[in-house]
Amino acid sequence: MTTPRNRLFLLLLTISLFCRGILNAQSIQFKKYVNQEYHFSFDIPSYWTIRFSKDQGGLICVPLTKKEKEKYRDCFEGIVFRMELFNANLDSTLAAEGAYTKVGDTYYTTDRTYDSVKSKNIKGSSWKGIYHDNVCGITCANGFHAVAGQCEFIYFSNGKATVCINTNGREFDDAVLKKLLNSFRFYQ
């Protein structure tokens, strides 16, 4: 039975949880990553770093703190995301990738469970791009899991260069994704 006292308790609990979510999102400290070769920048949490990996053949983002390393250790190879850089516009990059079909202004791709995954068109002050998330396979300490991951793909392009950021099976927290999208800039 719902009494006025129970309703008040539920209301206060809901407000408390909502505020905790806002405070957690606001408590993340960010730092700016700058790529001078391709002339772009964006913000990442201060507990991550981007570095070149010879084993991965490119740029990767890895966690720095023990807490973050534990999140990404077993099933995500210790990698938050990979970053690929292309000297081409968005259409040429996606055509060369061979995994995209364009219908009108919308791109489609496939994943491990669906033949037609629709991307979302995104844009910023100095770029346009696409975003989509796919069901993906991940390798954990106990073996390969074909449909256990959630990989996000974000392409940013200024018409001359394109940057692809793709997560390694664990999607970004909402606050981190929002900050990354809102802070991404190409510059001269």
Image (cartoon, rainbow, N blue to C red):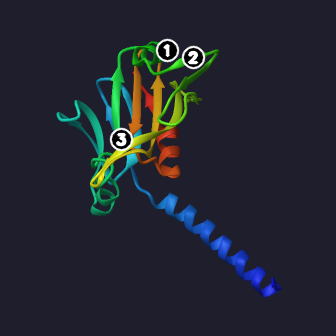
Left/right placement of residue 59 relative to residue 104 reads: left
Residue for badge 3: 81
Contact between labelled residues 1 and 2, with CB atoms less than 8 Å apart: yes
Q: Residues within 10 Å of mark 1 (few under 14, many from 20)?
A: some
Q: Residues within 10 Å of mark 2 (few under 14, many from 20)?
A: some
Left/right placement of residue 78 relative to residue 151 reads: left
Please state which of the two labelled residues, at mark 2 or mark 1, is closer to the viewer: 2
Contact between labelled residues 1 and 3, with CB atoms less than 8 Å apart: no
Q: Position of residue 44 (x, y in %)?
A: 39, 46
Contact between labelled residues 2 and 3, with CB atoms less than 8 Å apart: no
Q: Identify the residue shown where x is 30% and y is 45%.
A: 79
Q: How far is disc 3 from disc 1 in space, using C-alphas?
A: 22 Å
Residue for badge 1: 91
Mark before the other along the chain sequence, 2 or 1 = 1
Q: How far is disc 3 from disc 2 in space, using C-alphas?
A: 25 Å
Image position of 128 with respect to 183: above or below: above
Q: Position of residue 171 (x, y in %)?
A: 46, 47
Left/right placement of residue 30 relative to residue 10 reads: left
Circle 1: residue type: Asp
Q: Identify the residue shown where x is 64% and y is 15%.
A: 104
Locate residue 87: give its quadrant: top left
Mark before the other along the chain sequence, 3 or 2 = 3
Residue for badge 2: 102
